[in-house]
Image (spheres, coloured by chain):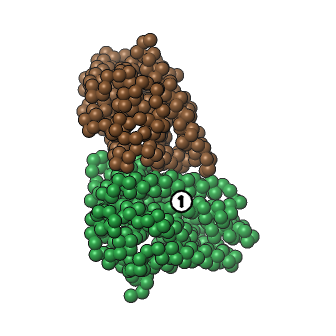
Chain colours: A green, B brown
Amino acid sequence: MTTTGRVEEALVDRREIVNEAITEQLPIQKPERLYSASRYLLDAGGKRLRPTILLLAAEAISDVEPMSADYREFPSPVNGDVDVLSAAVSIEVIQSFTLIHDDIMDDDDLRRGVPAVHREYDLETAILAGDTLYSKAFEYMLDTGAPAEKSVEALDELATTCTEICEGQALDVDFEERTDVSTDEYLEMVEFKTAVLYAAAASIPAILLGSDEETVSELHGYGLDIGRAFQIQDDLLDLTASSEQLGKQRGSDLIEGKRTIITLHARNNGVDVDTLVSEDPTDEEIEQAVQTLEDAGSIDFAREMAQDLVESGKDRLEVLPENEPRELLEEIADYLVERGY
Amino acid sequence: MTTTGRVEEALVDRREIVNEAITEQLPIQKPERLYSASRYLLDAGGKRLRPTILLLAAEAISDVEPMSADYREFPSPVNGDVDVLSAAVSIEVIQSFTLIHDDIMDDDDLRRGVPAVHREYDLETAILAGDTLYSKAFEYMLDTGAPAEKSVEALDELATTCTEICEGQALDVDFEERTDVSTDEYLEMVEFKTAVLYAAAASIPAILLGSDEETVSELHGYGLDIGRAFQIQDDLLDLTASSEQLGKQRGSDLIEGKRTIITLHARNNGVDVDTLVSEDPTDEEIEQAVQTLEDAGSIDFAREMAQDLVESGKDRLEVLPENEPRELLEEIADYLVERGY
């Protein structure tokens, strides 16, 4: 099987389990409109990348065969059993909360090929659905049955992560009004807005299962590296994938004037990024803009940066025992920059 | 000194300490716009009722003289020292987060006599400021230095409380579109939307300081009772206080068609509540509407219900040692329904 095939199989296998756990832990109860809005994006799809990373990291740490142990009663090398699936649901629910609120802030109409929550429902329900998922995520992270000291540490990681996601989003908004953003500033923003949740997904199983500090820290670093690579790939895909594949307008970052590593590099290399596309561009106009960025070397620049981050992330996994789950975590890193959508 | 005087003094004393703690724990750091928006409502005022209740409950439980112990190293009867001030800040920060998001949802322009955060800043900053306060509150609750099992329990109470606040707000929104809301349904909504945060404020110090289950449960019940009384009084004040005292338009609940215990009682007694005021009423129109509600007995009905809840809440405090902080908690209960704004 190809690497991509193996990763996709690992994702599909765990996605089913995560989806079932979401239905179980987040039932559509009273008030029904609130909970149905809270579930709407979760039910619309998603690869479940972050929970899959969490579950694979747990398997790598406890050195068990992939999919051989019950995620609800997962054997820790030092503590008793831990419900790592509840932690995985927590991370996915945080991701969903941020998407709902981000779509309001960006006034995006589409997400995962369906209307954004504030379009399908309304603004107040969308704000409230996000807020509900937020506290639910903390409830789920408290429900793992890990020793109290470990739960506290995991909660602390989760809370800090959420604060950083907000800070990253605020930086992103600020950047839209600035023309002098450096690539370092951009990468810091991406670290906060996107990468920290990968870091939480990779390190929280190590915390809950009682790993040593180095393992927690290296898995955290793995998450930060591949999370940044993921965002850079997302920036690339916004330009190179079709609107159909994306589930939203191709080139939307250019249209909205969002800073990306690609446009920042292009601007530093003399491209007038602000006039690349009109407000309602044709497909040809987008195509032309992408060619300009390609000619400026900006697309290759982003690709290489993503690749370097992936290599760095993979190196950090050496702290784990050599086993199949660890291999899958390495392959997921590659997959993040090879995926076409 | 009068009871009200004693309560107001207790509030003023602790408000200063809480305000200083907020400045210390939530500094305006980078990204500055985000943190200045997060602090905006907190800095605009507020009585710090909930944190004061938390601090008084801590004093009553540990049986110390009011203001005699350092809230940052507060003596627990069974554990080591606990930073109950960080827990108090956590509760106030949650309150502030809910106000910011509620003002967006209700599209209210004014709060505490200043523009709502989404008016002073913008919609996206207001959403994000609320989200930031949300995770910060969890960080503060994790920072009390209580034993891990107690921290986990307090976090669980906080997360559940936040979920219930969202559910209460969702019910409140639903009610605006229904004409058949019963007073029981209304009270359930108020319990979730408002009272649970008082319950958290009163019970979390008991959790952190290692009180027995009965004490935790009775303090929780005290919070639920006085929180409901507080909301009913708020509904009353919206009709009886001036726009100046309220820091917002008098009668705004009538104008917005919000269900309150008063309008629900009036409707059940044949008053056509929906036509009581126009969309942009004069002061005389509001005055007339209030007279109609008075004549229907609806205002007295609400006053009596609030009074009964206060008595029930005070009775629950019998679980605490007899001391001055406990007396102040009793007086706060009275104060909530006697306050004029």
Name the quarter where the N terminus of chain B is drawn: top left
Q: Is residue B325 above or below residue B180?
A: above
Name the quarter where the C terminus of chain B is drawn: top left
Q: Is residue A329 above or below residue B209?
A: below
Q: B263 and B163: which one is in front? A: B163
The quarter holding residue B81 reads: top left
Q: Residue furthest top?
A: B1
Residue picked out by circle 1: A193
Q: Which residue is drawn at the image coordinates 41% and 66% (left, top)?
A: A211
Q: Residues within 10 Å of mark 1 (few under 14, many from 20)?
A: many
**How many numbered marks have been drawn onto this rendered protein structure?**
1
Q: Which residue is drawn at the image coordinates 28% and 54% (left, top)?
A: A28
Q: Which residue is drawn at the image coordinates 35% and 71% (left, top)?
A: A62
Task: Give the percent coordinates (x, y) of residue B279.
Answer: 45, 30
Image position of B195 (left or right of B136): left
Q: Is residue A252 above or below residue B45?
A: below
Task: Give the percent coordinates (x, y) of residue B79.
Answer: 37, 41
SS type, badge 1:
helix
Task: Give the percent coordinates (x, y) of residue B202.
Answer: 36, 33
Q: Is residue B314 visible in this depiction of the protein?
A: yes
